[in-house]
Amino acid sequence: MRWLAFSMAGLLGCATLRGADLRIGIIGCDTSHVTAFTETINNPQAPGHVSGGKVVAAYKGGSPDIPSSIEHVEGYSKTLQEKYGVRIYDRIEELCQNVDVVLLESVDGRPHLEQVRPVLKARKPVYIDKPIATSLRDAREIFRLARKAKVPVFSSSGLRFAKNTQAVRNGLIGRVEYAETYGPCSIEPHHPDLFWYGIHGVESLFTVMGTGCQTVQRGTTTNGLIEVVGTWRGGRKGIYREDKSFRGLARGEKGEMAVGSFDGYQPLVAAIMKFFQTGVAPVSPKETLEIIAFMEAADQSKRQDGAPVKIRLRPPATPARISPK
């Protein structure tokens, strides 16, 4: 109920955004998502066009210590300017003055907390691309600030919105007792192992399993790839395995079904636009935080030679100080 109250507070605290096209601003032009999303939104002839808004502004961003970021930021920025007429701003604060809603797209999760601060201060609804942050601590702080500002926020991988994955999420095979998802897991040294790309498969896993994971144990498959086993309340099992392709399987009370595919960007963009228009997030903060906690626990398990690690969504309580007599 707390998360529902948060969403409704954001909806009531920000102006309803239905009606005329929303002015959309992008923060971080160092990922192919910025051109893919803009094409889907701005071009009425694009396959799977999503109406309701227009990308009109962007802030370049970029991380000098991540080659894929610094090598692409200028090129994607140029495409936004020349192909779509997007205006580039030098400051996030200035961008926020000229848009209704924000896509925080920086490929590097480390600056997300600092980049979202002025967005929340300006009270602009914001979608934060994966990963929401590179630590559970930062992710919690983002949601705390959003709740305080009464601004709707959500974060997700696009794989959450794949057709079969959503069908299972919505109960097609009943309560899921077991699921396994697969996907690439390229490593970026400034991010915990699963945060950079493994998060896609983990997002699919949580979409069908839901919250309630209690312990995480990381190991390797027979061919030496990453394998992470989660145990949910009631003994339910969910497994993420590194693989070359996105796929998976869920078994429920009424049968089993393939899940975990990537169905393109359109389902995610449609979900984002609906979120911008209604102020209601399609993913709860609790679920996003548990995904981050799952991936952090997997890293901790790796450091402990594969020992099971309990998931903790909140930091341990600080012991009370005892005054000397």
Image (tube, rainbow, N blue to C red):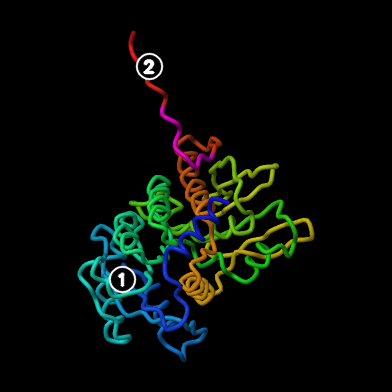
- SS at mark 1 in the image: loop
Q: Using the numbered discs, state the Cα–Cα distance from disc 2 to disc 1 in whole angstroms.
A: 51 Å
Residue 210 place in picture, x, y as percent: 62, 54
Residue 47 place in picture, x, y as percent: 50, 86
Q: Nearer the viewer, residue 164 or 185?
A: 164
Q: Which residue is painted at 37% across and 66% down in the image?
A: 124
The quarter of the rendered structure image containing the C terminus is: top left
Q: Amino acid at mark 1?
A: Cys
Which residue bears the numbered disc 2?
322
Counting residues from the start of the chain, the first of labels 2 and 1 encountered is: 1
User: Does the image show residue 134?
Assistant: no
**Neighbours of disc 2 within 10 Å: few (<14), some (14-19), many (20+):** few
Q: Quadrant of residue 28?
A: bottom left
Q: Which residue is painted at 55% across and 70% down in the image?
A: 262
Residue 208 position (above or below residue 262): above
Residue 307 position (above or below residue 273): above
The question of residue 123 being in magenta is answered with no
Q: Which mark is residue 29?
A: 1
Q: Residue furthest left?
A: 90
The question of residue 315 being in magenta is answered with yes
**Neighbours of disc 1 within 10 Å: few (<14), some (14-19), many (20+):** many
The boundaries of the magenta stretch are 311-318
- SS at mark 2 in the image: loop
Q: Which residue is painted at 50% across and 44% down in the image?
A: 298
Q: Amino acid at mark 2?
A: Ile
